[in-house]
Amino acid sequence: MADKSKITLGMIAIVVDDYDSAISHYVNDLGFTLIEDAHLSPEKRWVIVSPGSDGAQILLAKAANDQQRAAIGNSTGGRVGFFLYTENFKETFEAYSACGIDFTEIPRQEAFGQVVVFRDKYGNKWDLIERKSKDQA
């Protein structure tokens, strides 16, 4: 068995319809950082965005065939599949609201912290979470 202390989740892929549109959404609307945008061929690019300095990065993968296009916005079968942590829920929620992010509910308080579900441009569901500090638990 591999030494678990040497394994991390480095990146996940989200299937998108267009690189430039996806970059604009994740960078301008959600505030992510564009880490890399390398042209591999006329049809394919290596596009990485990240919401912060910690955690996994996201590879924006342009759908290349009908099967991949069918997965756009439904990579987790309609469930929340992505979890975005914030240290200031109110500020992030208000900024996302101002950008027209599609929230599917009103913010709620859970045992682990404050949370609200939103959809990205493609329909993928995300939890926006401000976790309770250990002092609040």
Image (cartoon, rainbow, N blue to C red):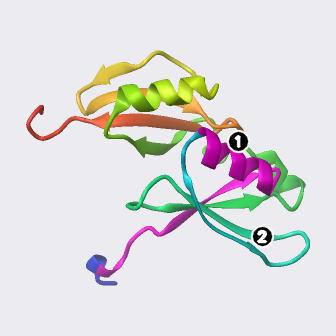
Q: Is residue 20 magenta?
A: yes
Asked if one can make out residue 54 in the rendered structure from this viewpoint, the answer is yes
| Residue under the image location 31 percent in, 40 percent down | 87
| Residue under the image location 37 percent in, 35 percent down | 129
* 45 over 56 or under it: above or below: below
**Front-most of 58 and 26?**
26
Q: Are marks 1 and 2 in contact (CB under 8 Å)?
A: no
- Check the image and name the residue furthest to the top: 106
Please state the horizontal and vertical placement of residue 115, each as a whole percent of the image. Answer: 38, 28
* Mark 1 Cα shell of 10 Å, populated few (<14), some (14-19), many (≥20): many
Q: List the residue tagged with mark 2.
A: 45
Q: Earlier in the sequence, mark 1 or mark 2?
A: 2
Number of callouts? 2
Question: As drawn, is 1 to the left or to the right of 73?
Answer: left
Mark 2 residue element: strand
Q: List the residue tagged with mark 1.
A: 73
| Residue under the image location 79 percent in, 59 percent down | 62
Q: Is residue 41 magenta?
A: no
In the image, the segment drawn in magenta is 6-29
| Residue under the image location 32 percent in, 35 percent down | 130
Asked if one can make out residue 1 in the rendered structure from this viewpoint, the answer is no
Question: Quick one: quadrant of the C terminus?
Answer: top left
Q: Choose top left, top right, bottom left or bottom right for residue 61.
A: bottom right
* Mark 2 Cα shell of 10 Å, populated few (<14), some (14-19), many (≥20): some
Please state the horizontal and vertical placement of residue 75, each as a whole percent of the image. Answer: 65, 48
Work out how far the residue at label 1 is from the one at label 2, CA to CA, in angstroms.
19 Å
**Kind of residue at disc 2:** Arg
* 13 over 72 or under it: above or below: below
- Check the image and name the residue furthest to the left: 135
Question: As drawn, is 68 to the left or to the right of 99?
Answer: right
**Kind of residue at disc 1:** Gly
Question: Quick one: quadrant of the N terminus?
Answer: bottom left
